[in-house]
Every structure is written in structure tokens, then in C-alpha cells.
Image (cartoon, coloured by chain):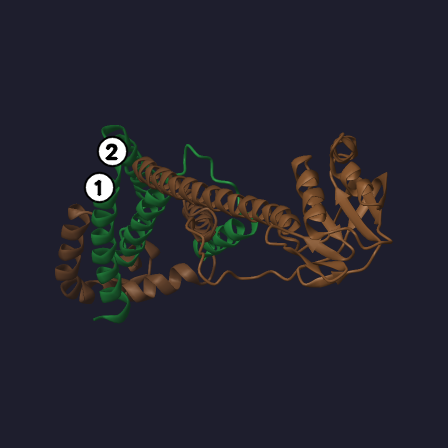
Amino acid sequence: MSNHDETAENRLRKELPEEVPAAEASEAVDGAAEEQAPRLTGRQRLAKGLWPPRVTRAQLIVALLLFGLGFGLAVQVASNSDGDSALRGARQEDLVRILDELDDRTQRLEDEKQGLEKQRDELENSSNQAEEARRQTVEKERQLGILAGTVAAQGPGITMTIEDTKGTVEADMLLDAIQELRAAGAEAIQVNGVRVVADTYLTDSGNSVSVDGNKINAPVRFKVIGKPQDLEPALNIPGGVVQTLEKEQATVTIERSDKIVVDALRAAKRPDYARSSSQ
Amino acid sequence: MIAVLGLVVGVVAGLLVRPEVPAVVEPYLPIAVVAALDAVFGGLRAMLDGIFDDKVFVVSFLSNVVVAALIVFLGDKLGVGAQLSTGVVVVLGIRIFSNAAAIRRHVFRA
């Protein structure tokens, strides 16, 4: 096992050939085991040690130690080949290094996660804002649609009916009525199925009146959405619309209602020249 | 024969029982196993040389294991555990090889 063994072996090897004749002689004499042992070759000794099995103290002790060795070997191999416990055999500094690497990695992933979350929040915010803007746009469109007459409207208001049997009502009187209603806060007006909007015009045509080119037959019926408490007095003021019409022999009836439906529509018209200057 | 049986029984027992290696012993077990292997090869060679002595074998086996474990322990304490255990394995490996060569000469005469 060491240098000492090496020299012993060398000596043995050199001496062996010379000893052979003497050993043979002694074997021939009595064949004592003590004398016999050194003459045997290694192979013979191995075979002899293996078979037949002898229960000697040496064999038992060696067996015990080899049992320990085999046991340790198997345990080590088994614990090493466990896939999940690859870190079990690692040394402290390796473990520290691995831990550091994992910490770094965790940090990086954490940063990345925060960045992505921020991005997601921004996207959500912007989509919320876009949604809000869209909603406001729709709302605005409805409001403007009521003004432009492209959508129907309903709400509290009044109905004014002008009975004009003698055909004395003229366009300017109706225009006065419309102006008065607008001044009193009317939000949507229709006259006998014609929506009154910003560019509505009234003309006299023979005995009757045309609104936007549509001839209106008596009785003239205004449907107005607005605050009834404002609209009715505005028409009834002395020297106002109602009195002027009654002077012309027309009968005017005004009734308030909680629900006036203005459902006459007007096609949206694209202006030829005017363009929105705000984007 | 009994000795070979002991080795086989040990391996089988180790595989079957699969005991949990205590954390204290864990770093020393592989080195101890290699040291014991060295002792076993040395013993085998001594047997082939005809100079095998069970007392020497027991002492060398145990001292090999203890010294190897001690070196690793010391290396861990000094902070050079990895290098020192590599060194121990190299030395023991060289000895195992030289012993194996001697055994081979005996068994195969080559």
C-alpha cells in the first residue's frame, strides 16, 4: 500500500525464483502450511482465499469493513443520483454562489415584472381614457344631434296649436313664435312634422306657410321640448306671440305636458365649405 | 469469500435501506469511501503478495478513512475544502491505480 509494501514486493519478486527449489523440497518433505504459503503464486492465493470459504477472524473483520465500504458506497451513489437533491453534496461556497445567482435572477425577473406591470397599467389607463373619450363623444353627438335634428328627442315641454281658419297667419308670426320659444330655452321644436333647426326658413306660400319648403296646413301644431314653466309665459306675455296671433283671428291653445316627443328628423348635412378647425 | 460476501451484502443493504445521510457526515462520505477503496486495493495486493495481515488491514482501512475525513474537515475550515478534497482524491486515485497494476501483474502475469 505504500513504499514499504513496494520494496517488500520487489524483494519478494526477486527472491521467488531462487526459493522455488527449496520450497519444493520442503513441500516434498512434509508440506507444512507455514512453509507452503510463500511459494504460492498470487493467483493461487486468491483462489485459495475465495474457495473454500473459511470463517476465520481475519475474514470476518475484513468482511465487516468491506460491508461498511459497500454500504457507504451504495448510500453515496444513491444520494448522488437523486435528481432533486443535486444540491445536497454541494459545498458551502458553491451553495452561496448558487444562492447569489438565484437572488440576482430573482431581482432581474422582479424588475422585469414591475416594468411589465407598469406597461400594463399604462395600457389599461389609456384604454380607459379612450373609452371615456369615446363615451363623451357619443354623448356629445347625441346632444348635437338633438340640436341638429338628426336624432329624436323627448322630454317635458308644451304643445301649441294655432287654429287659423281664415289663413291670416303669416310666416313672420311663426318665426316670431319660434324665436320667442328659443329665447325661452326651447331645446327641440317641430312644426307639423318638420323639425326646426338652425337653418330652418319660413316662407309664405299663398294662403299658408312653408317651413323648409314643406307646406304646412292648418292647424299649425308646435311641439316644443323645454321647461314648460318658462315656455308658456314667454308666449303669453302681453303683446307677445299669442296676443299677436289672436289679433289676427287665430285661436291659440297651449298645453303643458311631461312628455313631448319630437320625432321629426332631418338628414345630417355635410357642409360644402366649412370644416372643423379643431381636431 | 466471506469478505467478498460482506462487500456484496453491504452494497445491497445500502441500496435497499437508502438511509438519510446526516448532514454532518455528508461532505466526508465520498472521500471516506475513496480512502476505504484505496485500503481495500492495498489489502488485496498484500494478499496476493502473501503478506496480508488482518490487523494491518483494519488499521490502514480505519486510518485511511479517518485521515481522509480529517483532511476534508480541515480543508473546509481553512476555506480550501474543494481543492483539498480534489487533492486527496487524486492521491488516492494514483495509489489505487498502482495497487491495481500490482494486482494485475499477479493475476494476469502481465
Chain to which the residue tagged by mark 1 belongs? B
Residue at which label 2 appears: B75
Earlier along the polypeptide chain: callout 2 or callout 1? 2
The residue depicted at 53 percent of the width and 45 percent of the height is A133
The residue depicted at 66 percent of the width and 42 percent of the height is A179
| A137 to the left or right of A31 | right
Residue at which label 1 appears: B83
Residue B55 on image: x %, y %: 34, 41
Q: Amino acid at mark 1?
A: Gln
Displayed quadrant of residue A114: top left
For residue B13, which numbered disc appears in the image? none
Displayed quadrant of residue B84: top left
Q: Is residue A81 above or below residue A240?
A: below
| A25 to the left or right of A263 | left
Residue A156 on image: x %, y %: 79, 39
The letter of the green chain is B
Helix, strand or loop under label 2: helix
The hue used for chain A is brown
The answer to the question of whether label 2 and label 1 lie on touching residues, with beta carbons closer than 8 A, is yes
Helix, strand or loop under label 1: helix
Q: Is residue A104 above or below residue A190?
A: above
